[in-house]
Image (cartoon, rainbow, N blue to C red):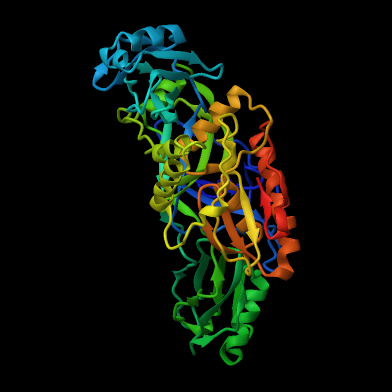
Amino acid sequence: MATKPNQLDLIVDVEGKRLLQSFTGNKEAAPPRLTFGDKIPVTVRVVRQATSASDGQPWSEIPLPNHTIRLGIGTPAGDPSSGTFTLTFDSNTTAALNYNASASQVQSALNALSTVQSAGNTTVTAFTSGGYRVVFGNLGARNLLTADTSGLYPTTGAYINEAQAGDAGTKEVQIVSLKTEPAAFSTLSTNLDAAGATIATVRAGVANNTSEIQTLTLDPEPYAGTYTLTTGPAAKKTAAIAWNVTASDLQAAIIAADTTNLTSKVTVTGAFPAYTVEYDNTLGDVAALTADVSGLTAPTGRKGDLDLNVAGLVEHLDGATEKPATLEVEIRNTSANTSWTVAQSPCTVAEDLISNAPASKTPLPDYFTNTAFLGARGNLDTTNLAAGLANILLDINQQVSGFTVNTANYVWDFDHAGRYLVTAFVAIRPPAANTVNLIINKSGTETVASGEYLQAVEYENIAVSGIINCLCYKFFSVYPSAQFVTVIHDELIMQVPDHQLTTAKIALDQCVDSLNDELGWTTKIRCGWAPGKTLYEAK
């Protein structure tokens, strides 16, 4: 995993959700060991299993246009262990609540506020996995609660979202969750370096006295392609040289470029990616090699620094000399404001021996929510289709444009127990079927466990149609020839030629199986033909 001293090089297998030891093998990387107080360079490459052996590698890199990589170290879904917090509703703030306050204590504190009393008070229940469900007593829309968690330890954030939007016939329901923030965090937004070659003269030649020695290093290390060198007293150009050429073959290529001057007068030692070229002393001072690396394929991904001299790691260690943690790698689409966790790997954080400057505050990730989307879904009312249509159209227009919604094909079928799982709906449509329909349907009649419901709520709180984005990403990774048409929250439409529909169907089946395994929910995503067999659906 780490190929350079004092640098953390991560290769992420997005299908296996693991860190790889190398790009050329299938072994999982050993858990990294990180030391408090350090600031280390980090590179991240995102890969999937190669679909062909054309480049001779077991992995293919996934391009990341408009994406950043986010790294976090800490305890996933950790709970605060001490301290207090407050909740505020419409400018009125509760008394301090203990970090482990019971549902009845939170309810009493909220109901003591005049603004909450005007809203009909609240009924608060607690989730077994942590967090509170707050139901307002009166019908109608409510502003979101806010929280002050600065008094909690370790550093903790509050995640508050609208689970059910209130209206004239509906009570507002909000979810409050307190979770510890990452102990260390970094956003990587800089592209990895393009292919390059470093050439240095170690010793200048002196005619008939001292041989010239030059070094050639390919950095960053390529994994495919070819390059050429210009070499020798006549500055002759070699034929194409393989990216991982052996020293003996590199020597042969240099000599072949200028047999008149270089035959039996060049010796190459070393191994990919670093070589030493020595010229016979009869050649005297030889001009430095030049390289054309435009034909090389270098790693792609993101790079940056991970600051480990932060207060969050002091809290995480809590006096211990070392402690286990989780290293999380997340891809964030900066244009669509969606994110996808691609790996959670164990790691160890150790205390340092040599003191550093005082630890700074841990930078925290910026969170994006989509309460307007959840509110629009909550406002869908089968007894008032006009109002429901207006709400969903308003939401769609915030996300996409340039199409006409066919209202005749709306399916007004909604179920609170299943509505957050409905986001996993994919349709592969042959090109001949060119209408765009918005389909709103529940995922099935199975019971959804309360823990899974909360998990789905939190998932939607940080990603618009998070599950559909995962499925989209997986499908395009294994079937890049599909043509993207549009995504409208509950429906992602892709076009494939008629003769490819069968292979696309198989690819989607495989992606769905993989996603079901990752989610681990009792309600499963299933594939099947829609009526008329114009759409093959995963829902």
Could you say which quadrant of the image residue 37 lies in?
top left
User: In this view of the protein, which residue sits in the foreground, 157 or 70?
Assistant: 157
Whether residue 14 is situated above or below residue 449 in the rendered picture: below
Question: Relative to residue 428, is residue 152 drawn left or right?
Answer: left
Q: Residue furthest bottom?
A: 260
| Residue 441 screen position, x and y as percent | 60, 42
Whether residue 287 is situated above or below residue 9 in the rendered picture: below
Question: Relative to residue 95, is residue 11 drawn left or right?
Answer: right
Residue 95 appears in the picture as rendered: yes
| Residue for point 30% across, 21% down | 89
| Residue for point 65% across, 80% down | 252
User: In this view of the protein, which residue sits in the foreground, 298 or 229?
Assistant: 298
Whether residue 110 is situated above or below residue 492 in the rendered picture: above
User: In this view of the protein, which residue sits in the foreground, 213 or 74?
Assistant: 74
| Residue for point 49% across, 31% down | 458
Q: Residue furthest left?
A: 91
| Residue 375 screen position, x and y as percent | 42, 36
Number of numbered labels in the structure image: 0
| Residue for point 68% across, 59% down | 50
Could you say which quadrant of the image residue 432 lies in?
bottom right
